[in-house]
Image (tube, rainbow, N blue to C red):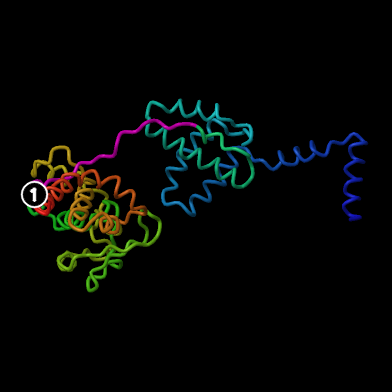
Amino acid sequence: MEQAREAARQILSEATLGGDPALDRKRKREEVIPTFEQWAADYLSEAQRTRKRPDAIAWNLKRAVAAWRSRRLDTIDAEDVSLLFLAARKTPIGANRLLATIRACFQAAVKKKLIRENPAAGIEPNRENPPRARVLSDEELGRLWTAIEAEPDPHVRGAFRLLLETGARLGEVLGARWKDVDLEASRWRLPDPKAGTSQTIVLAESTAEWLGKLPREEGCPFLFPGIDPEKHRADLKKPWERVRKAAGLGDATLHDIRRTFGKLVAREAGLHMASALLRHSDPRITAAVYAPMAEAEMRSAVSKVLPFLRRAG
């Protein structure tokens, strides 16, 4: 109790002598509030440890630092964020990514109690087009297989086959290492996938069988070696152009192969299995992309059931 009284007397004494305790506290708080550049550096350092793609975060933070470099965090308001967002409107999707990065950066500062409110919280992003829904038909798939088998390079054929038979992403396929492929267990481990944590792709036995016959380049740790034996193949752009044209696939992209894989799995084994095999972190992602495309199959299923319902009636 005596300590509390002494603290109160001290506050009153400072006020009597012309001091302002509230102002002193405000000054001390302002002294520890970093500039945007300082905070952006701290935020990026954390992102580099915990996020899978810190390069995109770094790119957007550089744009914000250029605008607010020496300004303290608590002096940046919603109008400042709006002006920066509008300045990037020529590329609406890029502007949205910029806004998302800035919003997350300020929200981290709120959690650290460096600022009270997030100045980017109430700003609406640009409207984006719905996700691409192109999938290959059964006929197109048949032509695609024929075109792939006509490719003379076994590693090019293998890369396309692995894309088709696993639904893996292009970067995952090209970066695949022999040490991560267990042919006996028909399993392929991804030590550093998009999600940021180790994942496993289950291989069909037939896939493991042809992988076992794939030629190996001496001294190269990768399934699909590049020109430099210590590196993997950089891309499949030219081979894909050949294959796409030979198969008559029009505007199809390599990522459409993954989408086609997901659709076929969803059709045969349900959305839950498709989500597991595509390794989506959130099943809602799978549902948003593949549920609309399954409408024809759903209508077909309903049509098959109706005769039994009517007969029962």
Secondary structure at badge 1 equals helix
Instruction: Give 54 or 237, whichever is nearer the viewer.
Output: 54
In screen coordinates, is 273 left or right of 64?
Answer: left
Res. 203 image quadrant: bottom left
Q: Residue at x 22, y 63 (%)?
A: 217
Could you tell me residue 173's position as x and y percent? 26, 56
Residue at the extreme front: 313
x, y (%) of residue 22?
79, 38
Q: Is residue 65 above or below residue 138?
A: above
Image quadrant in which you'd find residue 279 = bottom left
Is residue 174 in view?
no
Which residue lies at the image location 26% right of the left edge and 54% below the top edge? 271
Residue type (three-letter) at the residue carrying disc 1: Ala
Give, as a single range, the part of the protein colored magenta.
123-145
Q: Position of residue 12 (x, y in %)?
A: 90, 41
Residue 167 in percent (x, y) is at 23, 54
Q: Is residue 248 above or below residue 275?
A: above
Residue annotated with mark 1:
147
Q: Is residue 283 left or right of residue 108?
A: left
The answer to whether residue 209 of the structure is visible from this angle is yes
